[in-house]
Image (cartoon, helix red, strand yellow):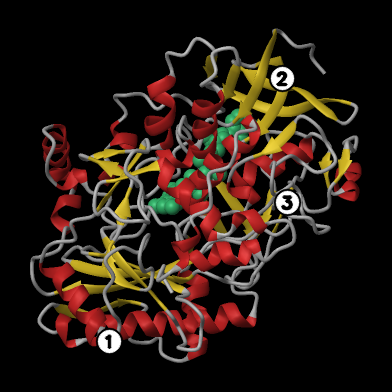
Amino acid sequence: MPSPAAEDTFDFVIVGGGSAGCVLARHLSADPSCRVLVLEAGRPDFWWDVFIHMPAAFAFPLGNRFYDWGYRSEPEPHMAGREIYHARGKVLGGSSSINGMIFQRGNPLDYEAWAELPGLERWSYAHCLPYFKRMETCADGEDAYRGREGPLVVERGPAKGRLFDAFFEAAQQAGHGLTDDVNGSRQEGFGRFDRNVRRGLRWSAARAHLHPVRHRKNLEVRCRSFAQRIVFEGRRAVGVEYVRAGKVERVTAGEVISCGGAINSPQLLQLSGVGPAPLLRGLGIDVVQDLPGVGENLQDHLEVYVQHACMRPVSLAPNFRWRRRPWVGLQWLAGRGPGMTNHFEAGGFVRSRPELPYPNLMIHFLPLAIRYDGTTATRGHGYQLHIGPMLSDARGTLRIRSADPAVPPALRFGYLSTEQDRREWVEAVECARTILGQRAFADLDGGELSPGSDVHTSEEILDWVAREGETALHPSCTCKMGHDELAVVDPDTLRVRGLEGLRVVDASVMPTITNANIYAPVMMIAEKAADAILGRKPLAPEVAALTGAGL
Ligand SMILES: Cc1cc2nc3c(=O)[nH]c(=O)nc-3n(C[C@H](O)[C@H](O)[C@H](O)COP(=O)(O)OP(=O)(O)OC[C@H]3O[C@@H](n4cnc5c(N)ncnc54)[C@H](O)[C@@H]3O)c2cc1C
């Protein structure tokens, strides 16, 4: 192994300047006597980078090596053997610099379920709510559920126009209610959605948390620095070995905090000898700590697009023509126009069966028929619902294939592998069709583009989902908190079990995935972790919070 080219010492080394990493960098560097280093494998989120900062441009970084790790799953046996593409942010701000900016806390009962697990009593909704509030400034509405002074600005989509009107009307005609705030008083129902966008700019974790404190002399951020291994002395993590500009360098750390996300954190742990011993030994890696749960319990959300052609020229389709794009960009620079939106302005949460305790389907409506990668289903006008079950019981695995850090790990999600998952998928597609089939769309509907007229039976629907389903890009839960045999981190401290000087703080520590997009929960976890790491008294639980909250 090459000898380290440089040696420095920090109190905290944060591996990954992504969503959670930026939150920790801000909090941990607040004390000027504490030296903090952030190692980020990607490049900076340059101020001029329109593909990051313009909300409507979010499809561009996907699949681009300057922004995206570009993972692929192993062939998924229940998804027609497809290797599912998994974008992951590889840039300062991490996935929050390339994500869809949809801001969802999940259902309060998600956290109640966490709190029922042994050792997670302090992760109930009442314990999490003060941290959700602390991190945000909610531009709309003021009540007991929403924050007013946090660095992360969220504003609600306007969701205006003929197609949004038809959508809200159709949801009600299909028997669903409306809700004022899916992140506050009630998750169930349909309404305008929050997004982390402010005045037409993506409000990434880097913009909210890191850039305002970059001037601190005790905070250093090293981009294009790929951590390959955590260095141990006995059972204590004492540093990180990373590659920058082709050279292996090493830093010494009082504590190492892995914030690489749900794919890279377990990968880094396994590469460093922390994980399932048989896997590590098989690859010739010395075992520092046998933790069978590292890389297990992988969870995600899958989604499909139910798309319709639109008979009237009321969709956003014209803005996506190449010849219009310079005009969209110019308008955005002037602070207006279609470049200002992330497109996910409205949607809803629905129970696929009435007996369920809370809504298990998430729906987004777009006045446009377009896939995440920017490809459109029709050259004309269209609209669509994204839909998917949020609480699948499918569980997957992440395992390194080699001791070489450059080799991506093997990802197996197990999409559609369980009876519950398959049943809820059929219910989800039927639910979407019921909404889009309402009379509110009668004078707009130009016919279903997908799944299409030849997909009817449960088998046909599942076959279509297997061929067309895409990840909603929410991998999580691969280094879960807890005290059972698959638990990886301690729920109170987020320290890796059995080791000193090493914590994990990111999407991987969730025990189970939440009932919506997961960026907001990750940010909440990081806020709460910051207090634990600094030994600060946790915020007082807001016990009244469950009253009427999304139930
Ligand atoms: C394209 C896309 C769209 C999404 N849309 C939404 C959405 O609209 N709403 C929502 O709620 N969620 C969305 N998500 C999910 C959400 O953004 C993520 O779950 C969340 O941001 C994850 O945060 P994290 O801190 O766990 O990881 P990340 O934010 O991914 O941060 C990890 C960081 O660590 C760095 N890193 C990793 N390994 C190393 C290493 N070895 N050395 C150095 N640096 C390393 C990475 O480059 C990255 O910057 C989306 C995700 C993607 C990718």
Which quadrant would residue 296 be assigned to in this image? Answer: bottom right
Q: CA distance from mark 1 to mark 2?
A: 57 Å
Q: Which label sits in the foreground, 1 or 2?
A: 2
Q: Amino acid at mark 3?
A: Gly
Q: Is residue 435 left or right of residue 539?
A: left
The spot of residue 138 in percent (x, y) is 30, 47
**254 lies above or below 330:** above
Task: Say which quadrant the C terminus sits in.
Answer: bottom left
Q: Secondary structure at mark 2?
A: strand
**54 lies above or below 77:** above
The spot of residue 538 in percent (x, y) is 58, 42
Q: Amino acid at mark 2?
A: Ala
The spot of residue 221 in percent (x, y) is 52, 19
Q: As rendered, which of 518 and 129 lies closer to the eye?
A: 129
The spot of residue 65 in percent (x, y) is 48, 35
Q: Which residue is mark 1?
A: 174
Q: Is residue 447 left or right of residue 97?
A: left
Q: Name which residue lies at 10% across and 82% down.
A: 443
Q: Secondary structure at mark 3?
A: loop
Q: Amino acid at mark 1?
A: Ala
Q: Which residue is mark 3?
A: 295
**211 lies above or below 299:** above
Mark closest to the chain's N terminus, 3 or 1: 1
Task: Say which quadrant the N terminus sits in.
Answer: top right
Q: Which residue is mark 2?
A: 253
Mark 1 CB within 8 Å of ligand 1:
no
Callout 3: few (<14), some (14-19), or many (20+) C-alpha neighbours within 10 Å?
Answer: many
